[in-house]
Amino acid sequence: MLEHQEDLNDLQRRFPILIVFVILTFLILVIRIGYLQLIMSGYFRELSESNRLRSLPIEPYRGLIFDRNGELLAHNVPGFHLSVILEDLKNKESTIKRVAELIGISEKDINARLAARKDTYPFAPVRIKENISRKEMAVIEANKLDIPGVVIEAVSRREYRHGNMASHLLGYVGEITQAQLDNFEDDSVYPGITVGQDGIEKTHDPILRGTAGYKQVEVDAYGHEMNVFGVREPVRGNDIYLAIDVNLQRIAEDALGNESGAVVAIDTTNGDILVMASHPTYDHNLLSKRLYAKEWEALVNDPSKPLNNRAIQGVYPPGSVFKIVTAAAAVEAGTSAPEDKIFCKGGLQFGRRFYRDWKAAGHGSVALHRAIVESCDVYFYNAGIKLGVDRIADYAFRLGLGSQTGIDLPSEKAGLIPTTTWKLSAKRGEWIAGETLSIAIGQGYVLTTPVQLAMLISSVANSGVRYQPNTVWAVKNRLNGEKYRFPPAEIGRVEIKEETFQILKNALRGVVNEQGGTGGIARSAIAEIGGKTGTAQVVALKPNISKELLKEKRFKDHALFVAFAPVSEPKIAVAVIVEHGGKGSAAAAPIAKKVIEGHLKNVGH
């Protein structure tokens, strides 16, 4: 009894403490609830709404691409991509494993794509497989409750109507990369949007891309769309009409066949690019789908370099085509009068070296006209000695060589026109007099691109008038249907006298139409063609290589030909290079002839 009384007394002593504890706990809870309800309510309401409501971009339809005559080259077709929204992944590892099982894509590839996306875009879909099949769509839909965060996006994908034709000119599209996102200075793009990655698709992407729309949607706990509250429709991109003629492009590409090389044709009256062919081509329909790393590496490491647009990125010695420059320099500088003759006996001894002419028996006594017609090396060796490399370079620069043409395509190369200053800087050595002889006939350090050579022959045909090379003929506004035609842009006149241009044009006419001319195979019954053959030696490959090995195609010289027509009233200028094609007269001239005749038949002459 006494013990019970003591327990009761002890409990009565502790009771006030218990009451204080309960009261304090209650007060803390009230204060906390009040803080959350009154002070933090706005924050949590906003957080809740952001989890429930999302503003999602709607990708616009990309503008169409046509040729100058309205032939459709690139359009859009429906497609479906499988994507992941990072914020909605409940269990990342198990979801990735399950998706990999369902659609046959490796977990490594999925993780690589997810890792490429910054955390700053948690609600932006990350594509893990493009253009999934209807069967794959059905499998995903049947398992969607087991893979929260995995969604199917309805999109439009790019399709090129003529296969690989003009692939380097048109380019291809693809999902915007993180590097591209980081470099954009405005908010016109977002993660997942399709942008141009090469060619016209890239340089004119702002015209073709259009303006994205947005929709406000409500999602459930799994990220599935429940309701749409508002939509701002996207604005479709504008259409582009290219300057190329698709039929002429086909003629050029068929003529190149399986050879590696390039063909560029320019409208001499305005600078429009009528043809731009580069072989080997690539499948831009395939590249517009996302490739896996191994597929991309195989393409990049392909020894034939199919991704290289040889028309603007291929740099080659111009060979005897460069004699046009040396001839212009000699006449303008007065170091060689057009009527002055030299005697060619098959080569020229200069110092301790004998410089051979392509014709071992020699050309005999020749002045400038026949030297161009027959492509006499010895004549131009002599001209080069009198001029010096810097004067030759001066006229090469005047005619547009050694610098980018400014064509509206990405990654154009500038080529190289050597000077004494250049060698001192680049090679850390003095210019050697014998090197000038090689430069005078377009060998040695000289490097040019096919588009530069097309501009060169166009400038000669135009008596020095130079137009900006232009790939786009017109842009059509999708909102009002109006077409805007880009006017020709004259970018300057070559500082060479008209009399000199007439001498050159007459000689170039002779190359094709006179007896003994090296370009006789290009003679046409449709119109008088003027041109110049070229054979570019693959010099760097030849030392210490056996004669048997030199017979292999990869060691053959490059074949070149530049031409314009009609001589009396030029409408088209063409440059052709066939890699390891041998003689320009045999491999390149017939291609130029086909392109010229195809154009003149179409426009009249």
Image: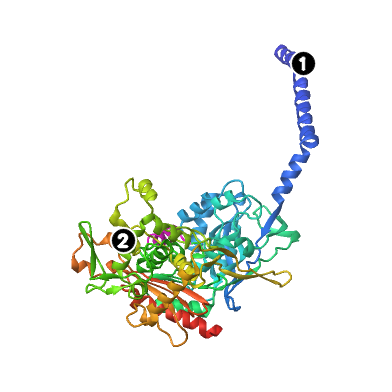
Mark 2 Cα shell of 10 Å, populated few (<14), some (14-19), many (≥20): many
Q: Which residues are magenta?
A: 291-301
The secondary structure making up most of the magenta span is: helix
Residue corresponding to mark 1: 12
Calculate the distance from the C-alpha at mark 1 to the C-alpha at mark 2.
Answer: 115 Å
Q: Earlier in the sequence, mark 1 or mark 2?
A: 1
**Residue 243 horizontal/vertical position (percent):** 57, 72
Q: What is the count of numbered marks? A: 2
Of residues 308 and 90, which is closer to you in this image?
308
Relative depth, front residue between 1 and 532: 532
Vertical comparison of 584 with 334: above or below:
below
Q: Secondary structure at mark 2?
A: helix
Dividing the picture into quadrants, the one containing residue 542 is bottom left
Q: Which mark is residue 438?
A: 2
**Residue 149 relative to residue 307: left or right:** right
Of residues 19 and 231, the one nearer the viewer is 231
Q: Quadrant of residue 474?
A: bottom right
Q: Are marks 1 and 2 in contact (CB under 8 Å)?
A: no
Q: Position of residue 356 (x, y in %)?
A: 24, 66
| Magenta-colored stretch includes residue 298 | yes
Q: Position of residue 319 (x, y in %)?
A: 35, 66
